[in-house]
Image (spheres, rainbow, N blue to C red):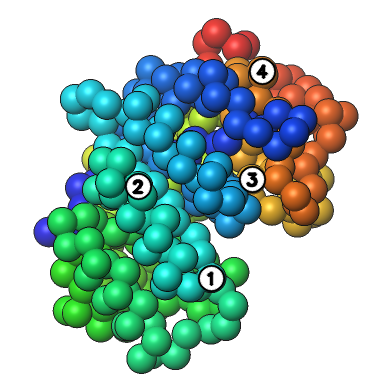
Amino acid sequence: MPRYSQALLVSCEIPWDENDGLMEELFRREVRRTLAVGFNHLYIFGTAGEGYAVDTARFQQIVQVFYEETRGENIHPMVGVIGLSTAQVVERMQYAYETGFRAFQISLPCWGALNDTELLTFFQDVCGRFPDCQFLHYNLPRTKRVLNGADYRRLVAAVPNLAATKNGGGLQRANDLMTHAPELQHFFDESTFPHGCLRGECSLLSSFGPMSPHKAKALFEAGCKADLSLLFQHQQEVHLMCQDVLGPLLEEGRIDGAYDKLLVRLGGLDEMPLRLLSPYQCFTEEQYQNAKQVLHERYSDWLPADVR
């Protein structure tokens, strides 16, 4: 059995005011809305949540607010920590740990690609520092080393509280990870999740969940039930919607948070600003309105009932 329970995981984005300060009340409403629509596995500070861009003061403020809003039965919050060194990661993790969190999402330091010895050292020094916590590894190219099934196979034996991964990559990546590291709960994106389900139990990381909770749940439930026909039908729907609504924006290659804030706003949180922290470029109001028009005209069934 995987070390982490099967789940549908979504991110909470951070709203910034014109002075790059946290819009606290809006953030609280976003977290409450995420829980209200039925997502109980949620996290902050992945790449979409600008975990790479916040300073320590803002990190601590947002961690505290997130903790206050995620108390209650059957709520599973996770804090992402991105840093250039083990020391930076551990320092921020220590604050979140003392606040009360016990689940973390970590990425490799991205200044230079880690070799095999450095890779093991990083996981042992970070995860080993907090033995009563569970860790999800966010496996992405920006860290200059994307781990494969053989890499995770070595880590499984040496890092007992490494419990999950977060991956994209399609059929080959899913097959590799599910075959060589079945002890870990692999959270796949919408395009990769159906391929993972062909190999057994896996989980869904849903970028589109905040925009379309019912569609994310339908995809996840089809996977849990191993309804392959419905599962790949949903996958095709995601692909078509993404190309039509976001296609022109995808060509611009913006940082993840630009897309995710747009998706949150399309899902009905109209006050969500598109702003990103310096130096990253957000989308314009015109680009948002163009995407919104296509979504409402061609894919209104993707919208929550109170937004259509």
Indicate which disc, 1 or 3, sits on the residue closer to the N terminus: 1
- Residue at 61% in and 40% down: 260
Residue 96, labelled with which disc? Answer: 2
Q: Position of residue 305 (x, y in %)?
A: 53, 11
Q: CA distance from mark 4 to mark 2?
A: 29 Å
Mark toward the viewer: 3 or 2: 2
Q: Which residue is mark 4?
A: 270
Residue 110 placement, left or right of 105: right
In the rendered structure, which amino acid carries the disc numbered 4?
Answer: Asp
Taking the view exactly as shown, the residue that stands out farthest to the left is: 1
Task: Name the residue that disc number 3 marks.
Answer: 257
First in residue order: circle 2 vs circle 1: 1
Q: Would residue 139 appear left or right of 96 to someone viewing this image?
A: right
Which label lies toward us, 1 or 4?
1
For the N terminus, the image quarter is bottom left
Check disc 4: other Cα within 10 Å, few if <14, some if 14-19, many if 20+: few
